[in-house]
Amino acid sequence: MSQLVCINDYENYALKNLPRNACDYYKSGAGDEQTLNLNRNAFKAYRVRPRVLRDVSNRDLCTTVLGMKISMPLGISPTAMQRMAHPDGECASAKAAGAAGTIFILSTLSTSSIEEVAKAAPNTIKWFQLYVYNDRNVTQQLIQRAEKAGFKALVVTVDTPVLGNRHEDVRNKFSLPNHLRLANLEGVLSNQIQKAVKSSALTEYVATMLDETLNWQGIAWLKSITKLPIILKGILTAEDAILAVQHGASAILVSNHGGRQVDRCPSTIEALPEIVKAVGDKVEIYLDGGVRQGIDVFMALAIGARMDIFI
């Protein structure tokens, strides 16, 4: 492991060692993956204009997000089903985020529960990524559990009324391995993702379980049942950013779901400037997608992001 010195090294190691089902799930995008690849390549269009002869002997990467102090402007994304990659899954990721002094975002579709992660990483700043279910009682119970466990914000995913067409998952008939479960849910809400019928189990799960009617009134409902700040994840246009502010979002996460939802949409770094121009003086703006090294974080901050979220 000492030979792994950059993100590309870790990615290549994972590609060689993970089971095919898990590997393809983690790495694939929607359609022919143009947006997936564009997320990374779009950063290459930007250039840094370095200044010289500045005293840089006292450096501090600390910042605040929603009033919470973190060690660096980089948080950990809500990647689902992490125990397919390691037995400790989301608990290990939350511990690592805490050790680094930054934020961990737990996915609704995690293989470690809200309570398990809270117990494993009590000192980590934790946010909860939320999908809105057809059964609003399920959604409300998830929020209440996150509140009780000390999570500090809700990251509401707004770009998944249906799941993106991910060819690799369809070919593999992706399903969660039988020894794992969606730990935040019970019964059919948890085990249906283990049974692919025609395409991938995740596609079928989203189509039957998540609320495809979710609209801006749904955000108002969420605000009425929680005092936690709400971050909207999946905003790519100035128009939606303005609506997010009007409907009380505390922050915006500029995201295209890692290129896994709608192919041919803009990269996040391309979408960032118009969103910063539209609402950058009103709410905090975060970005995910394509971030591979520190210079990418720097570029997003220079354009106007408050923090990057690493997928």
Image (tube, rainbow, N blue to C red):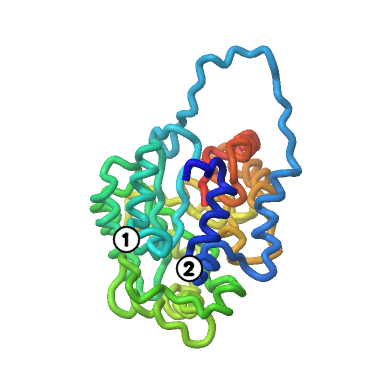
Residue nearest the observer in this picture, 221 or 169: 169
- For this view, does 123 lie left or right of residue 10? left
Residue drawn at point x = 31 percent, y = 49 percent: 151
Residue drawn at point x = 67 percent, y = 43 percent: 273
Q: Is residue 147 above or below residue 99?
A: below
Q: CA distance from mark 2 to mark 1?
A: 19 Å
Query: What x and y, as percent, mark residue 231?
Result: 46, 51
Whether residue 283 is visible, yes or no, is no
Residue nearest the observer in this picture, 122 or 237: 122
Tell me the element at label 1.
loop
- For this view, does 230 lie left or right of residue 187? right
Residue drawn at point x = 44 percent, y = 64 percent: 218
Tell me the element at label 2.
loop
Residue drawn at point x = 56 percent, y = 62 percent: 27
Residue nearest the observer in this picture, 15 or 227: 15
Q: Quadrant of residue 56?
A: top right
Query: What x and y, as percent, mark residue 120?
Result: 26, 49
Mark 2 or 1, closer to the camera: 2
Residue nearest the observer in this picture, 135 or 190: 190
- Do tag 2 and tag 1 residues touch (Cβ < 8 Å)? no
Under mark 2, the amino acid is Pro
Q: Is residue 230 above or below residue 164?
A: above
Circle 1 Cα neighbour tier, 10 Å, few/some/many (<14 / 14–19 / ≥20): many
Seen from this angle, which residue lies furthest bottom?
197
Provide the residue designation for mark 1.
112
Under mark 1, the amino acid is Ser
Query: What x and y, as percent, mark residue 233?
Result: 51, 55
Circle 2 Cα neighbour tier, 10 Å, few/some/many (<14 / 14–19 / ≥20): few
Query: What x and y, as percent, mark residue 148?
Result: 23, 53
Whether residue 51 is visible, yes or no, is yes
Q: Is residue 249 above or below residue 137?
A: above
Please tell me the numbered disc located at residue 19.
2
